[in-house]
Image (cartoon, rainbow, N blue to C red):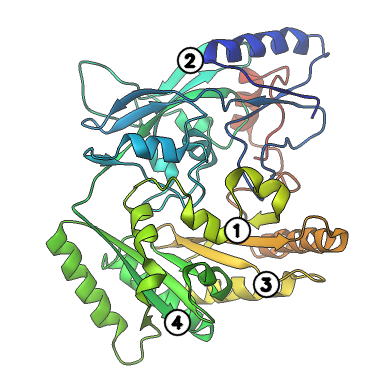
Amino acid sequence: MSAVLRPGDAEEVARIVRDTARRAATGTHSPLHPVSTGLNWGLGSGSPVEDGATVLDLSRLDRVRTLDPRAGFAVVEPGVTQGALAARLVGSERTLNLTGASQQTSVLGNLLERGVGLRRSRAEDLAGLELVLADGTFTRCGWWPDDRSGTVQPHGRGPSLNHVFTQSAMAVATAAVVRLLPRPEEVRVLPLTFAASELPAAVDTLRSWTAQHLIPATTKVYNPVAARTYGVADRCLVHICLTGDAGLVAAQARLVAENAGRHGSPFAPGPPYAADGHVHRAYAGLPDPDDTLFLRKTGCCARCLDTARGLLMFLPVIPFRGSAVARASELITAALRGRTAAPGVTMNVLDADTIDHVVTLGFPPRDAQAVADAHRTLDRLHETFAAEGHLPYRPDIDHPLPRPRGLLHERLRQALDPHGVFARGRF
């Protein structure tokens, strides 16, 4: 990178973009790489894909501009963390769809990444965007608050444009309208465990339960390495979150227990500590100022992770089938190179047909051989999964997706940023 700029408000962002646009017209500019808080660990954090870019650090834009729990939305700037927004909602009728990452991560940044929350995809939380285009002008897309209406319509009117700007590098987002969840009467997280050898049967059972609406499409499955975070040794762990009316949650929990306890089931009840109060609080959208779960997972704070630990991540989406998940496990094991340890793998159910994998490769950052082995492993993961048609839904800076070759993508890019004001992104 050539420099780091830290504007203090949206108007300053626009001035920086306009200045860059003037220089871009003569070919003398350093393209801008916007980041929110830069805590995109394992995928490059705040670093740009290509050398020579100027990082536009938006973490000082940290205002919650509007908060309307009754209507169910908030307008936030890029520097607003999920912990800060969740804290503003305590005691209200709404909650934030938290992710499993640190409380210090950006809500807007994860929306633009189409990250996965504990209760639903973060893409579903996005209702509108405020943008600075490549010529420095402001615009908005999607739905924005109107004092005359309390109805949030995430698709807006006319063509829906929000997701032109998610996972793209064609504008700077200076604010977003975030949809909030109704606060449930009851939140219950059920822990189940199963032997790693039962992975295909366990996944097929969970898929059946999801397809038949016995459980919601928010289940998380942890391989034995990832399950250690929750105190489970040598077994896989499942977290099933049930929310809503207390009577309905109780009835669902009974049905899940009955199904899990049937003869031939791969599941056993998990110990209560595998879904303790910290886990329940996260699913309930309650902030944790101590970042307990994140510290359990990583062993260090959010701001020191990049220097204290080596971390690479691989995030493919695969079919929600036992055979496909078993095959993914085989590919992960076969990809390990040198001294790279078996990774923690968290699987997030997206719907009755798809499940993503968050493969976490940790290594000592000052051990040159360990660093090289981890990168060789990541290269192999990309190669072998791509060969079977399973692509990452969030790539890293060393494996950016090929530039779009479709006519519509190319015309949009040319229309919105003809002089390359914005640096190439990972997507």
Q: Is residue 86 above or below residue 284?
A: above
Please tell me whether mark 1 sits on a helix, a strand or a loop: loop
Residue pointed to by mark 1: 299
Q: Which mark is residue 139?
A: 2
Q: Position of residue 403 (x, y in %)?
A: 70, 38
Q: Pick whichever of labels 4 and 1 is earlier in the sequence.
A: 4
Nearest to the observer: residue 137 or residue 383: 137
Q: Is residue 416 above or below residue 361?
A: above
Horizontally, residue 361 falls left or right of residue 316, namely: right
| Residue type of the residue flagged with mark 1 | Gly
In this rendered view, identify the residue nearer to me: 91 or 219.
91
Secondary structure of the residue carrying numbered label 4: strand
Image quarter in which the N terminus is found: top right
Q: Which residue is mark 3?
A: 342
Picture coordinates of residue 360 (x, y %)? 63, 61
Height in image: 394 above or below 148? below
Q: Looking at the image, is mark 1 or mark 3 nearer the viewer?
A: 1
Above or below, 260 relative to 349: below
The C terminus: image quadrant: top right
What amino acid is found at the position of numbered circle 4 in the picture?
Phe
Of badges 2 and 1, nearer the viewer stands 1
Between marks 2 and 3, how big is the CA–CA gap?
46 Å
Q: Position of residue 193 (x, y in %)?
A: 42, 79
Disc 4 or disc 2, which is closer to the eye?
Answer: 4
Q: Earlier in the sequence, mark 1 or mark 3?
A: 1
Instruction: Identify the residue under disc 4.
Output: 194
State the residue lying farthest toward the right. 368
Three-letter amino acid code of the residue under disc 2: Thr
Q: Which of the two discs, 4 and 1, sits closer to the camera? A: 1
